Image (tube, helix red, strand yellow):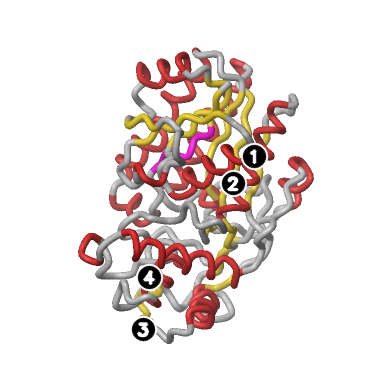
Amino acid sequence: MTVLVTGGAGYIGSQMVYALIDAGERVVVLDNLSTGHHWAVAADVPLVVGETGDQPLVSRLIREHDVEAIIHFAASLIVPDSVRDPLGYYRNNTVNSRALIECAIQGGVPDFIFSSTAAVYGNPDTIPVAEDAPTLPISPYGWSKLMTEIMLRDASRAHGLKHVTLRYFNVAGADPQGRSGQSTDGATHLIKVAAEVALGLRPKLQVFGSDYPTPDGTCIRDYIHVSDLAGAHLHALRYLRSGGPSLTLNCGYGHGFSVLEVIDMVRRVSEVDFKVEHAGRREGDPARIVAASERVRGALGWRPRFDDLSRIVRDALAWERQLMERFQRGDRRGRNLAEIA
């Protein structure tokens, strides 16, 4: 039996593939390589280049690889981009997910794990935000993910597709063993961008918004180490295999850091006082969002191992140094401007 990982050549997906291999699972990856890299996929794991919306291809993969679980990461995920290109996000995140879900049902795949987002909550009234809080996205990205959650819920009721939806908060860091990390050119993740600026790969870092209703005026986020997030997926897979009913769970640590606090940590760990500029707010960015994480711990027995901002930053910096060694400086694209939340 095999686990199909969509988006398995990307940041979180590639870490998930390593976690599955470490756990003795058979894996096949489907990725269109629009942001992922073929070299990011673990050795000896089949990589099929294609779209999750290509139903004949997905159906063939399910059949030929005897797929018994799908972990669905493939998506577009930049909030400001979704505001500029909402239809593209609804196509890639919602329409393609609908096609994948239908293939899972038709192919008899019993278990489905979906990569959702804290963006479904919008600007929550209560912090930390629990899973039963109102879902009121403020960006097309958040809506595209919420629509998929609704489709999964209804498909589960109609066809018995068991699923766990994991709502990610801000994912950061890299594999502690140095096997994978955030490698997308021009990525907008705060900690990755700050690490690149600290290492001289970008000239400066821009902070978008300094007038939010937070203690220092910048956005507050709950940062979760990518390895802990992959671990939550492993626990979700075991939970579904044991017969557990469908669930929707937050994936975060339950506490947050402001943009300026993160920048200060990157400066301290890197020992570089890099350039920071302030700019206006970006559309679609909530002021503060932190997970209530009791349910994921209780339902799945998940316990984070890397709940330490300095550790997250150290792993991110170590990965950036690896990338510097992997590629010639002239091969790096999209390094001219930092865009962060």
Q: Which mark is residue 144?
A: none
Which amino acid, by three-letter code, is at mark 2? Ala
**15 or 229: nearer the viewer:** 15
CA gap between label 2 and label 1 equals 6 Å
Image position, residue 339 (x, y; %)? 35, 67
Name the quadrant of the C terminus.
bottom left
Identify the mark at residue 275; answer none if there is no mark: 3
Q: Is mark 4 on a helix, strand or loop?
A: helix
The foreground one among 67 and 277 is 67
The residue indicated by pointer 4 is 196
Question: In the image, which residues are magenta?
Answer: 71-75
Of the image marks 3 and 4, the number of the one nearer the N terminus: 4
Along the polypeptide, which appears first: circle 3 or circle 1?
1
**Residues marked 3 and 1 touching at CB (< 8 Å):** no
- In the rendering, at what x and y percent does residue 272 appear? 43, 84
- Seen in the picture, residue 294 relative to 335 is either above or below; the reply is above
Q: In the image, what residue occupies the spot 56% across and 50% down?
A: 168
Name which residue lies at 43% across and 56% down. 182
Q: Is 82 positioned to the left or the right of 246 in the image?
A: left
User: Where is mark 1, residue-wise?
Assistant: 234
Of callouts 1 and 4, the N-terminal one: 4
Could one spot residue 140 in this view of the protein?
no
Q: Mark 2 points at which residue?
A: 230
Measured Cα–Cα span from mark 3 to mark 4: 12 Å
